[in-house]
Image: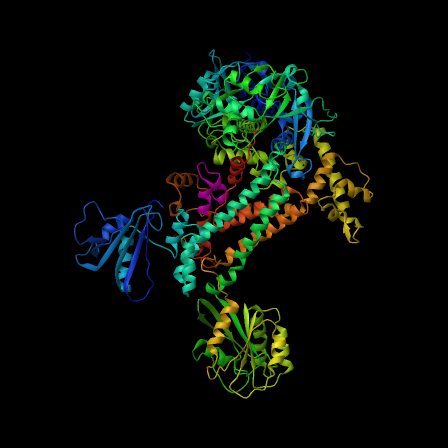
Amino acid sequence: MSRGDGFDIVVVGAGHAGCEAAAAASAMGLRTCLITIGLETIAQMSCNPAIGGLAKGHLVREIDALGGLMGVLADETGIQFRLLNRSRGGAVQGPRAQCDKAAYRAAMRRRLEKTENLTVSQGAVSEVVVRKSAAAGVRTLDGTLLPARAVVLAPGTFLDGVIHIGPRSHPAGRAGEPPSVELAGQLKALGLRTVRLKTDTPMRLDRETVDWREFPPQPGDEEPVPFSYRTRRPLLNKVACHIGYTNAATHAVIRRNLESSPLFQGKIMGVGPRYCPSIEDKVVRFPERTRHQFFLEPEGLDAPEIYVNGLSTSLPLDVQKEVLATIPGLDRARVLRPGYGIAYDAVSSVELLPTLETRKVRGLYLAGQINGTSGYEEAAAQGLMAGINAALAVREKPPFVLRRDEAYIGVLIDDLVSTGVDEPYRLFTSRAEHRLLLRIDNAGRRLMGYGRALGLVPDEVWDEHLAARGRVGRALAYLEKTRIRTETGDRVSLAEYLRKPEIRLGDVLEYGRFKEKLSGEDERYIESETKYAGYIKKQEKEIAKAMRTDAMKIPAGFDYRLVPGLTREAVEKCEQRRPASLGEARKVPGITPAAVQNIGLYLEIGRKRRGPGIDVPRETAPDE
Amino acid sequence: MLEDTIIARATPPGIGGLGVVRISGRRALAVAEKIFEAGRKTRGGFPVRRPVFGTVRDPERPSALDEAFLTYFKAPRSYTREDVVEISAHGSPAVLEAIVRLGVEAGARPAGPGEFTLRAFLNGRLDIIQAEAVNDLVRSVSLGQARVSSRQLGGSLSRRVARLRGRLVSLLSGIEAGLEFPDEGLRTGPAAAIKALASLIPEVERLVASYERGQAIGEGVTLALVGRANVGKSTLFNALLGDERAIVTPYPGTTRDFLRETVVIGEAVFHLVDMAGLGRPSHPVEKRGVALGRRIAREADGLVVVLDASKAWSAEDGRLLRGFAGKKAVVVLNKSDLPRGLDERRVRASAGSSPVLEVSALKGRNIDPLRQALRTRFAPDAGQDEEVVLHARQRDRLQGTLEALKKAEALLAGRGPEELAAEELREAVRLVGELAGEVRTEEVLGEVFGRFCVGK
């Protein structure tokens, strides 16, 4: 094990969060160690073989704009690419790729092993070394001490993980790998509250034993849209996914065997995600449905495994086989790995600061499933932000926190630290208040400047981004100033014409003489900005208004006890921190949005002694 | 909250038979115990929600201040959801002020206006509609307003708004599910969404429209009396008020300033404005009065157009009637006690849909029918159960909701982007949420998972 004189930063766990954290910290020039229990499972996609989708694809693009790795690697190892919601507007389009799992793992490992300042080593961490409420390194099971100035913990589902298949259960972090029981115990001892969550995975089938004639294919896009600003080579679709359905016989088998499900036996202690229910869950919760859709997804170009997306289950293996036997085309399919449920500990994410540092232990950062999220993309986004913030903290620089209105990453982390989770958290586009502003086609504009300032975006990517901005600016100006006569005889600008729902940019450019070559990304950006113009303006106004509210001053001697509805804890915290504005109050740990609203209302009331409306807002703060 | 306990008199200032002092907060009981001595010893403190007879005392002095009843409302079953004590004493301002002072000495703080209701709102006892209703109820000028306010305090409008919101969230979640899970075939087709909107839009429209009546029984309808000089506007003004408020002379142009008085007709509140005649002014002061009068007439909610029935039809009358076309009006043919000079058919031809009534303000003839005509014209009855929007704030939110819903409908019908229709519905949900004073986003997702089977 490589030790040297200690590291600046130790990252525990080489899943999607850990890899991004380690890569970012080392690229920012810090001596970093990434420690994993298995070098073979670096960046393992332990559930479905796909990256991206709605909101998740947005995240990948944001990670990429900031200089993270996931987008580049997904493009590099993708074997089928689709832009979801292609027929809808730019804000709700999300790229998704089926990836070759083995290729993704290998590509990540190669990249990390080549990275300067980064040591990748194998070992099982049993303890975070804490001195004076600050992380000082980690200790492995064999007793080795790795001193460090900051620690990023990204252990996934390994904290006290227990795998369930039917009535049987055994401790495990992932199929075939041991859990981290010691670490789970230590985090609790440090006073970090935990929640018990669970998630199910489907069975993997042998591709040679599936009768493919029964399942219509779902091909990739003709013109794949890449995740990454760095991808230069064209993307190729090499496989198709296939669509299938369960039927009445399938549901009968499941109903008959419900009592053998650990879920219904009450064995799995943990809350599962509503958006990714097991097949037994779906059958029980939606009894009126006569069939449920599933997708057959290859785990790789040459891999024998087929992932049955939509048939997650923790029923016993013999029942899983019985279920498959009811579905024409899968009736002879061989199960290479049974579906299973896994229950695990997650740290209550309200224990975290917006930098993902724990409130209780300075220098200890948590990222990924340990914070109660699910999904590779959510994990990677947190890993990147934790790695960046750990590096900034070691360098004694101000933290890097994204707002809800500038990135899905901001929405994700703000949701985590301010409200916490009671089920595995997944990002959705509807979680964003300003969905029309957070698009894949403007991720670079929103975030690449930050990535560049952090030193994570290389010159050629930045230069190309600036060139695209110039091009797009000229195109937008051209559309505004060029006027045409429409079929109905009205004279309108090309931009106005483009606002009609059925008109695409291609149609508009046919009219004119704009000679510069626009990229697909440029075109999507121009369409979104033009078609959403009125809405974008309105949302920007709302954001400005919210920022003004946050700027509302709280008088120095303000007596928080006067504000009704505040808990004693909230009053004490505010009195300790003495926030100067409502925005600062929002960031005081333990202060709920409702508490901030009450403080704001109270201040507002004090200011407006007189005014129209109800008696209530005419209230006078008695201390003034 | 915490140590902060407030005290104030709850009955209006002035001398009354009884007066009530209210104390709310954690230490309400402790404060009360210091200043109130029960007549008979009560074991284990004051009973809950039962008046106790006793005396109010200054702890520093031997003699009692007043005899009083004390009622204790234990948190959270009280108006503010905090501990509340009400002391009902004799209504002398001096006594009540003394009780408040004693309470303050015993550790309470004088409450600001409306602070009890504010606490009820902040502690979640009332939503904002109910808080508004409390204020309306205590300030009701008319019985109609009192009845509507009391029903709204009971939560009738809040429930109605909550149901509306539920339907909006449900519609939105259908669209969101289709956007978030494009591969799962969950799409709520535009047709289904348009159908849902077709029943939502008229409902919101009805609520918006009910503000007309709400305003009449709440904030009041401003009616301007317009007409040429010397047609008897001021006499009519006085007759409607049943009072000699305006100075009446036989000379044209007597009224140069304007007068404003409030009169309740049935349940409706009217603010009548009397002003200078709108004819051709001869005096500079009168001239300014006329200009002011025109502005008031334009800004009023409605008009009472007064014509002189004893004079022949003039071009001036025609201009007057046409000049305010588009404004709701009632036309009065005054001086009907004098020999008729006016051709009524010409009046009716110019009056459009406005009712025309013959009145003699001087003799008090037909004043009651005029009152009734004003009521039906400007404050039409709503059914007993029909919900009425009383506040401009509420109306504005509903108006915004209506506009958002109409835009969503147009977008869906025109095959516009669904995410924009979703944006409009989100706006509608936000506004309706604001109406009830609460905003939550997690809800839509909750409904998505409750109704749709997702999980690729």
Q: Main secondary structure of the magenta part?
A: helix
Position of the C terminus of chain A by quadrant: bottom left
In this view, the residue in front, A165 or A119, is A165
Q: Quadrant of residue A9?
A: top right
B438 shown above or below B450: below
| Residue A446 is one of the magenta-drawn residues | no
| Residue A595 is one of the magenta-drawn residues | yes
Picture residue at 66% right of the left edge, 47% below the top: B413
B85 lies left or right of B148: left
Range of magenta residues:
A580-599
In this view, the residue in front, A144 or B341, is B341
In this view, the residue in front, A250 or A448, is A250
Q: Residue furthest bottom?
A: B339
Q: How many callouts does the rendering have?
A: 0
Which color scheme did the rendering employ for the protein? rainbow
A552 shown above or below A105: below
A209 shown above or below B197: above
In this view, the residue in front, A150 or A504, is A504
A440 shown above or below B315: above
Residue A261 image offset from top left, x and y in percent: 47, 22
Task: Answer whether residue A218 is visible to the viewer in this image.
Answer: yes
Residue A85 image offset from top left, x and y in percent: 66, 35
Residue A376 image offset from top left, x and y in percent: 58, 25
Task: Answer whether residue A152 is visible to the viewer in this image.
Answer: no
Position of the N terminus of chain A by quadrant: top right
Residue B280 image offset from top left, x and y in percent: 62, 81
Q: Quadrant of residue A617?
A: bottom left
